[in-house]
Image (cartoon, rainbow, N blue to C red):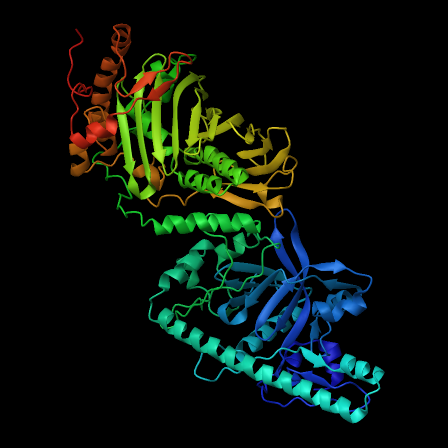
Amino acid sequence: MTQSSHHIHHHALCCLSAAPPQPDAPPTPAPEPAAATATAAPGSGSVAVAGVLHKWTNYGRGWRERWFSLRDGVLSYSKIRSDAGAAGGAAEGGIAEDGEVRLIGGASARIAGDRRPEKPAGVVCLKVSAFRESKSDDRRFYIFSPTKTLHLKTDSKDDRVAWIEALILARSVYSLRSFSGRISFVQSDVSVSTARLRNRMRQEGLNESLIRDCEQIMLSEFSSYRKQLKLRYEDHLSLFGSSRHHFEEGKDGNIIQGALSRNEFPSSRRGNFSEYSTTESDDFEKQDGGDLTCEEESTFFDAADYFTESNSRSSAMSSSTDCGVHSGTNIDNSGCLEIENVQMQDSDNMLPQIKRRSKLPEPTEKEKGISLWSIIKDSVGKDLTRVCLPVYFNEPLSSLQKCFEDLEYSYLLDQAYEHGKVGNSLMRILKVAAFAVSGYASSVARPCKPFNPLLGETYEADFPDRRIRFFAEKVSHHPMLIACHSEGKGWKFWGDSNVKSKFWGQSIQVDPVGVLTLEFDDGEIFQWSKVTTTINNLILGKLYCNHHGTMHIKGNRQYSCKLKFKEPSLLDRNPRLVQGFVEDNDGKKASFLIGKWDENMYYSNLDTSKIRSADQLQGASLLWEKSKPSPNPTRYNLSSFAITLNELTPELQEKLPPTDSRLRPDQRHLENGEYEKANTEKLRLERRQRMSTKLQDNGWKPRWFEQDAEDGTYHYKGGYWEARDQGRWDGCLNIFGEFSET
């Protein structure tokens, strides 16, 4: 191929060589008058392509030019910065590398002449990745690895062809399919020059014969070092090859699945990808470009998977620097280490694995519709707690169980405790703030209301697999008060809630009244109150809820937090937005938070007050992310966690007091789909509910909580779990049984 063809076509195949490296080529000193140079990479073994590609970053920043360099089967990319001295720095950035790098695309020559790339922002090993072209755009293609997906675009169709062919050839030249000696030592193009040594010896007046002897000694030492490096490299390959066999035998298949699940790459779609494909499914094309990528992340190599259906090719390798399951984006080094420490401690504790149900029982009856208008017209302006609604409007959970549902993401409090133990008070309050927001995540598309508990009704949740115990009791009927107490690893959480609600025909407004308190074992305390909830479109349209207002999380030590739940509007393009900040005792803002109460929360050192989405926040770090929805949500749209809350096994039933919500008959009938029985029982129990005011007036007191004489709040006085262990429920009334109104 002629030299002119290189300049005219810039084709990828012109710049790739399949000739194997020659590791044992002896270094020789260069002839006079130039200084002698020892080169560790013969040009025949180099595989190098470079050029500018447009990389999708996120919806806020869109497509950005990045410098991509392909060498030795590894594709790296970096940002491009303006530099007046680009000519001198081109080689440093990887643009001009001894004439062996060929540029693809017209913009590449301009970049090489005017600007130079920064250090690599990301690296992808092609042998453990898959790539393919877009069906809808002849300039776009994708590179998939178990840890990331690159969305790329060229300036022309020919440029895409060149890049794809370059990727295919680079993949075939540097194959990792065999570790039985067929992979050779890959040498770098770093050279050792004797020019400075020669000049220094000449200044001292040494003769040329002695100078040449010194050069030869230096080159001999370098050759010896290179051979030692080769032996060490082959040792690593041997170790890697033995690890590969473990992967193929399926011993570490969970690593492959973990790597794929972290990137939400469904197994149902993996079958559509081969190592290289020119077709793609419609659903991928529709969501193309939607990935949020962070280019300030640390350089890492991808875990391996061939993305094929063949069971015989399940080899994998991993050397990622990901911060863990609960931190999906790059954060500062100390934060990353701390989160990893938290997770390692979790795994070391060997928590018990408890199998819980994943769906509700199949309904035994077909549910009948009701007339909304006849109920609504008689209820406008009334307190919702006094309105008798058919069981059709209920979900098979009580308000006591809904309180425990707020602790679905209690692992955030475990992490907050660990951060505080190592002195990171800022990360502790950030995790607490994420926990305070996470309690709203399960309220999306929940069309039904929980059952209003009877006076004295209780609910317990003993979840050793989550290291948490929870207990709640209805302590007052009017005003309706629910008190709860929970204990986890190194923390206690309690509070009482008085829910005031108004029914306005088309909507319901719920205003929580009460304070939630979180106390860690080291004495640090945080307190906050919930924000207002509005349920809309009760008559017309799709039912939905919104949470709005300001949440103040007050700490007794260094930090406090303020979160603003954005009030929705008709033209709002970013609904459910939550923004806030953490400040110290002097009012100085230490960190900023942004997210959505139904999706995730991020934190950053940058001010987020003018940003409308976490996608627009560069360098934001993930604090919390909502769990995947249940595959069996039913019409109640319960989460996987909520489905487990009313589960009643024979072993558990023997331990429960007669006041537990799981034993409530109307709620149990509703869960089983016995709607007629549920309505009958609900009417019966609501008649008993009306007697609660008389009971309170006659001096009724809650069994497990006591009221503080100063502030009127309720605190757990203890004794419940001890009574449970002994099976002694003396004095606990059978509140769900038959009763006499006299």
- Percent across and percent down for residue 381 are 43, 12
In the rendered view, tell whether residue 236 sits above or below residue 401: below
Query: Which sits in the foreground, 73 or 726?
Result: 726
Query: Which sits in the foreground, 270 or 478?
Result: 478
In the rendered view, tell whether residue 697 sits above or below residue 166: above
Q: In the drawing, does residue 232 fall left or right of residue 473?
A: right
Query: Which sits in the foreground, 116 or 465?
Result: 465
- Percent across and percent down for residue 629 are 39, 43
Image quadrant occupied by the C terminus: top left
In the rendered view, tell whether residue 572 sits above or below residue 739: below
Residue 662 visible here: no
- Percent across and percent down for residue 656 are 20, 30
- Percent across and percent down for residue 265 are 45, 57
Give the quarter of the image for residue 247.
Answer: bottom left
Query: Which sits in the foreground, 735 or 585?
Result: 585
Q: In the drawing, does residue 554 fall left or right of residue 66?
A: left
In the rendered view, tell whether residue 615 sits above or below residue 485: below
Number of residue marks: 0
Image quadrant occupied by the N terminus: bottom right
Give the quarter of the image for residue 269.
Answer: bottom left
Query: For the view shown, which residue lies furthest in the bottom direction?
Result: 209
Q: In the drawing, does residue 246 fall left or right of residue 609?
A: left
What residue appears at the point 41 percent right and 64 percent down from the top-left corner?
Answer: 271
Residue 640 visible here: yes
